[in-house]
Image (cartoon, rainbow, N blue to C red):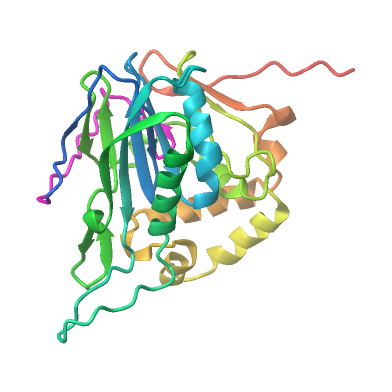
Amino acid sequence: MIIVGGVPFESNSTDQQFPRRSFRFPTHIQMKWKRRGMFMCSKENMLQSTLRLWMTSVAHMDYPAIVDHGLSQMLEKLVDCKHESEMDVHLIGGFEECPNKHDEHTQLRSKAPNDHSFPLCAKIIEAFVRSTVKFHIHTLFVLRHNTKIGTVGNALPIFSGFLVQTRTGSIVSATFDQTTRCPDELVRRIRVSASFSDSQWRNKLLETYDTQTDQFIIAPCYWSIRLVHMASYLQQLPDEEILHTCSTSPYAEAPDFIDNQKRMWNYLIQYPNWKESFKLGKPRIFARTVSGGWMMVEQAHEAAS
């Protein structure tokens, strides 16, 4: 299974946008297949590992509080109870949003307080150290090593997306447009935001793809009327203000960031009650069609008592 930003990505997809850039770390990373491994990833940090059975686990992590439970969720999928396997790990993606620079007098500028990547990276490494599982970190492409300066002097990540080739165990830099995001994109986006206030999902990774059945299973998540009101308010803001209000890294967002936000808000306004999306509190299930697309599976309603 491949998960990119929480969404499985097929190795035979027609998306071929793999930008190559010249930086010290190679865009092609060969994994060792004789060891078990685990892989976690994140907008701020992406961390990968591979199992002897050619299994790859990827997690998207945005904040430190999710690391401990998220790591446990990943290990449950990949490791037996003996914890004797060594996991090959690749941590990719976090960058210095406010990198230190030398001015003309060679004085170091102080780092701004809104740099989110360092605490997250530190928490992940700390979790590895405390774990009883053995981890072999092959790649630590984060922070300064994954930071470049844009044309207007803003910090940008060098490596912001990747593709894992499960047949060979290699990783290449990649970008993903709307055609590669798989089904129920808007509900999945809303669930990420709503999970912060839903106690059953707080500080947990949101799993969406079932490798055994080849189905997307989006478990129900509650969203409050407060989130709907917030969507109505944010929708009235100018684009520039939306960018700076809704993103911790406004200069590093993809060109469709604002459009994605507006589409999500429109859905919330159209369906303010979460039960309209999750009928009878059941998950939304999508099965693969013969043509390779996805179709929502109608679930039988429970008979009224």
Horizontal arrangement in the rendering, residue 63 relative to residue 36 (left or right): right
Percent position of residue 181, x then y: 39, 36
Q: Is residue 10 magenta?
A: yes
Percent position of residue 284, x then y: 59, 28
Question: In this picture, which residue range is highlighted in magenta?
Answer: 1-23
Closer-to-camera residue (67/284) = 67
Which quadrant of the view contains residue 85?
top left
Q: Residue furthest right?
A: 305
Closer-to-camera residue (119/219) = 119
Horizontal arrangement in the rendering, residue 92 relative to residue 209 (left or right): left
Q: Is residue 247 magenta?
A: no
Dominant SS type (magenta): loop
Which quadrant of the view contains residue 108?
bottom left
Q: Residue at x 38, y 62 (%)?
A: 249
In this rendering, is residue 284 above or below 90?
above
Assign the N terminus to one quadrant of the image: top left
Q: Residue at x 46, y 42 (%)?
A: 127
Percent position of residue 60, x then y: 43, 41
Q: Residue at x 42, y 34 (%)?
A: 7
In this rendering, is residue 298 above or below 267?
above
Percent position of residue 215, x then y: 49, 20
Horizontal arrangement in the rendering, residue 129 relative to residue 235 (left or right): left
